[in-house]
Amino acid sequence: MAKGSHRSASTGRYVTTATAARHPRTTVTESGSNHSSGTHHRSAITGHFVTAATAARHPNTTVTERG
């Protein structure tokens, strides 16, 4: 696993590295803080930024980052 904090996309809570390794599709690894302004949505599966509509359709596999 990559270095950084691991966060569950479904609960929003921080999880251990072992949990992140067991559930890679629903865990996001955060390497740094969000210094941008505004709200961004990121897919836990692909790691790509997605639209708000996509985040609403897939709440268990997207993470909302508030800047």
Image (cartoon, rainbow, N blue to C red):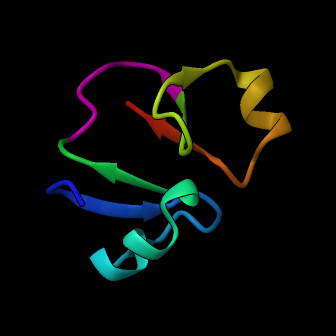
Report the residue at 52% width, 34% height from top: 46
Report the residue at 46% width, 20% height from top: 38
Q: Quadrant of the C terminus?
A: top left
67 over 63 or under it: above or below: above
Report the residue at 78% width, 42% height from top: 58
Report the residue at 66% width, 49% height from top: 61
53 over 19 or under it: above or below: above
Counting from the top left corner in percent of width and height, residue 54 is at 76, 26
**In the figure, residue 15 lies in which quadrant?**
bottom left
Q: Is residue 24 found left or right of 25 in the rendered image?
A: left
27 over 66 or under it: above or below: below
Q: Is residue 66 found left or right of 5 in the rendered image?
A: right
Q: Quadrant of the N terminus?
A: bottom left
Query: Which residue is at the front of the view, 21 or 63?
Result: 21
Counting from the top left corner in percent of width and height, residue 59 is at 75, 48
Give the magenta range: 33-40
Query: Which residue is at the front of the view, 63 or 3?
Result: 3
Q: Is residue 36 magenta?
A: yes
Q: Main secondary structure of the magenta part?
A: loop
